[in-house]
Amino acid sequence: MGDTAFILNAITETIGYYIWYLPKISFITDAFPLLGPATAVLSTDDEPSWSGGRGGAPDGISASDSWMDGWTIFYWGWWISWGPFVGTFMAKISRGRTLGQFITCSLIVPSLYSFFFMGVWGAEGIRLQNMAETEGITCADTYSKVSPAINLYCLGTEDIVFDQISAYGGKTLGDVLTVTILFSIVIYFVTSSDSGSLVIDIMAANGLPEPPIVQRIFWACSEGATASVLLSFGGEVGLKALRSVSLICGLPYTFCLFWFCQSLLYVCYEEAGDLDKDRPDMRSFITNIDHTKSGSYVSGLIKIATALVFPPLQLGLVMANVWKETIPGQWFIINIIWEGSMVLLCFIAIMDWEYQCVYICGAVYILFMAMMATVRADVRTKVGCERGDWLTDFLVCCTMYPLAIPQMHAELSAHSAAEGGTKNAV
């Protein structure tokens, strides 16, 4: 159906172009379009000032920032917010398969199908549109009376696919293909709803692998009712609100993906035998409240709160134990300088004396966390922990330093006590 030779050539050519263009477009962030158009406004306040915008193109010719916001950023947050559902479902149906089989069936095969699907429909649609424009078919006519040409540009989004397949042959073939497409769409939505309901049901059942069918039906009906209400009463505004919620939910989960990716890498190393599964670990997990395992959660909460507000108190003791001191209290004083600098810079920014100081404060924070990560790496070495690396320590300190500091303090104390010495205890 259609011009087969043209479609095959188009698929081959566009796949090659995609492979060539992908490295380039992967680094495109629309830096200049996001600056917005150049503006030159002379304010009429008591203190006149000249504003030239944010540095956009001075000739006023600049690309729109809508692509980055509406596609790149939106789909980034959209797919990440869907990650827990899709990942749980894929893990459930892939149990017992190898990583190679999983990657082939979940990444390579769907990608090849997408190339083929988009190549067939896209190439043929462009060909029909070109034929229509060559014949001079306008939106008043839409369809050619002498050829299969259709002015697809004039059709609604929901009509394009059905009108395009009608150009493949007679009315009977077009009806058969229409019914086939409608059946495929129904199957797609039914299976998507079923898999989504299964995952939500598993989560609601506290991880039960085979939750009750009645409960899954409840979630499926709830999802359908929610979608119907959103589309019926919310309309375009409701859909935009849903997109905004997806982006907001996707942002924090991005940092969780960092941990998941690194954890998956370590698990693969362990399965391959490159790392010992039973290698020594920290005595307490990073998210524990009581790292001393004494059962005193109040004491643990106090230490976490102290580390959050005043990190030098415990961190100075940890650094003195690991790096030693040539001058009494030197590490405590150095940490005071680090934290004092950040507090001062934030204060200047909050008082609106110089808002740019907030960025300097961010840079100081990153450097401070890098130093703390180095301390944590040395703590792991001293206590004999063979898990993790400096990058892990850096991510832990950046995101959870109020938990990392009490953990380091407790690990060193337990290590010193295990060695039978108290002079090095912190």
Image (tube, rainbow, N blue to C red):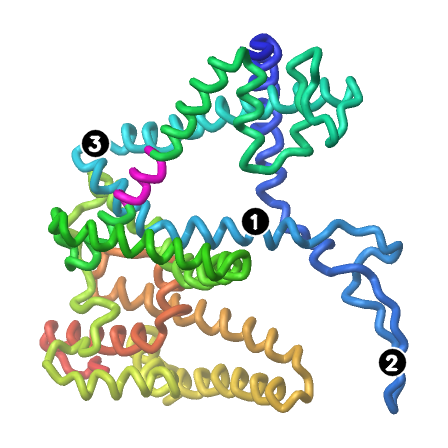
Q: Residues within 10 Å of mark 2 (few under 14, many from 20)?
A: few
**Residue 97 circle label:** 3
The residues bearing labels 2 and 3 have C-alpha atoms spaced at a distance of 66 Å
Residue 353 place in picture, x, y as percent:
68, 88
The percent coordinates of residue 89 (x first, y second) are 26, 43
Q: Secondary structure at mark 1?
A: helix
Mark toward the viewer: 2 or 3: 2
Please determine whether, in this image, residue 77 is positioned above or below residue 413. Answer: above
Question: Which residue type carries mark 3?
Answer: Arg
**Residue at mark 2:** 43
Query: Can I make out residue 269 in this image?
Result: no
Instruction: Report the quarter where the C terminus lies.
Output: bottom left
Name the residue that disc number 1 marks. Answer: 72
Circle 3 SS class: loop
Which label sits in the foreground, 3 or 1? 1
Q: Of residues 27 and 156, which is closer to you in this image?
A: 156
**Main secondary structure type of the part rendered in magenta:** helix
Against 272, residue 345 (above or below) is below
Q: Which residues are magenta?
A: 187-195
Check disc 2 and give the amino acid type. Ser
Assess disc 3: are there few (<14), some (14-19) or many (≥20) residues with their C-alpha within 10 Å of its C-alpha. Answer: few
How many numbered marks appear? 3
The tag earlier along the polypeptide, 3 or 1, is 1
The magenta stretch spans residue 156:
no
> Would you place residue 90 above or below residue 347 in this image?
above
